Image (tube, rainbow, N blue to C red):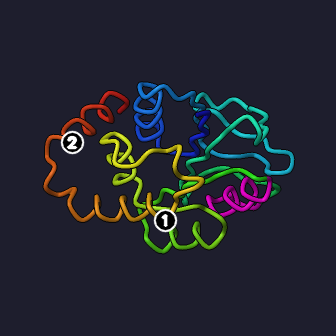
């Protein structure tokens, strides 16, 4: 799959990218957007990058994005999800705040979850990203079950920590 990661925390963006690339996915990370019409993103190096939604099969979008504005309005994950789903893209919301994940869902994300839990679930292959489009409820249920049991999986947490620490 071709995946766009929208995440302003560099270690999380790079950690997700590493795991997804090792799984065979093509990944682009951006930290935010200067504009959503046209879509002008800011990459990890602070460079502008024009994005065409048809370049990606899936968008993983953080809910709280910092520092970037569109004509004075700060562009948040809800705006990103609305824009990309409105153009036919498949989105998963990732935020540390449950209330923001609810907003991402209400605005078109197929499912949403705590970003650390989603990261560990992807690392642990809890669900197949290719299933998000057609089996989103099953993927969300698997994520929820994983969240409940993830406290018990110290080995996976240690593996995730090691990946993220490389990018601190």
Measured from the top left, where is residue 13 in percent x and y? 48, 38
Say which quadrant the N terminus sits in.
top right
Measured from the top left, where is residue 43 in percent x and y? 64, 33
Mark 2: secondary structure: helix
CB under 8 Å between discs 2 and 1? no
Quadrant in the picture for residue 152: bottom left
| Above-or-below relation of 32 to 165 | below
Measured from the top left, where is residue 120 in percent x and y? 32, 46
Q: Which residue is mark 1?
A: 137
- Identify the residue shown where x is 59% and y is 37%: 3
Q: Which residue is mark 2?
A: 156
Between 75 and 125, the one lying in front of the other is 125
Measured from the top left, where is residue 143 in percent x and y? 37, 59
Quadrant in the picture for residue 144: bottom left
Callout 1 crowding tier (Cα within 10 Å): few <14, some 14–19, many ≥20: some
Residue range in magenta is 73-87
- Say the numbered circle drawn on residue 66: none
The residue sitting at the front extreme is 134
- Measure the alpha-carbon separation of dots 2 and 1: 24 Å
Mark 1: secondary structure: helix
Number of numbered discs: 2
- Identify the residue shown where x is 34% and y is 48%: 126
| Above-or-below relation of 45 to 98 | above
């Amino acid at each position: 799959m071709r995946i766009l990661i929208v995440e302003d925390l560099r270690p999380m963006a790079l950690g997700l990218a590493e795991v997804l690339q090792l799984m065979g996915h093509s990944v682009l990370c951006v930290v935010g957007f200067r504009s959503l019409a046209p879509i002008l993103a800011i990459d990890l190096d602070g460079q502008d990058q024009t994005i065409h939604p048809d370049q990606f099969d899936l968008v993983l979008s953080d809910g709280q994005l910092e520092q970037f504005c569109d004509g004075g309005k700060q562009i948040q994950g809800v705006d990103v999800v609305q824009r990309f789903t409105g153009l036919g893209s498949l989105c998963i919301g990732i935020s540390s705040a449950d209330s923001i994940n609810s907003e991402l869902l209400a605005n078109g994300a197929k499912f949403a979850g705590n970003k650390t839990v989603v990261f560990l679930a992807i690392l642990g292959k809890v669900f197949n990203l290719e299933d998000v489009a057609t089996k989103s409820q099953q993927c969300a249920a698997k994520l929820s079950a994983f969240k409940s049991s993830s406290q018990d999986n110290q080995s996976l947490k240690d593996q995730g920590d090691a990946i993220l620490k490389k990018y601190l």
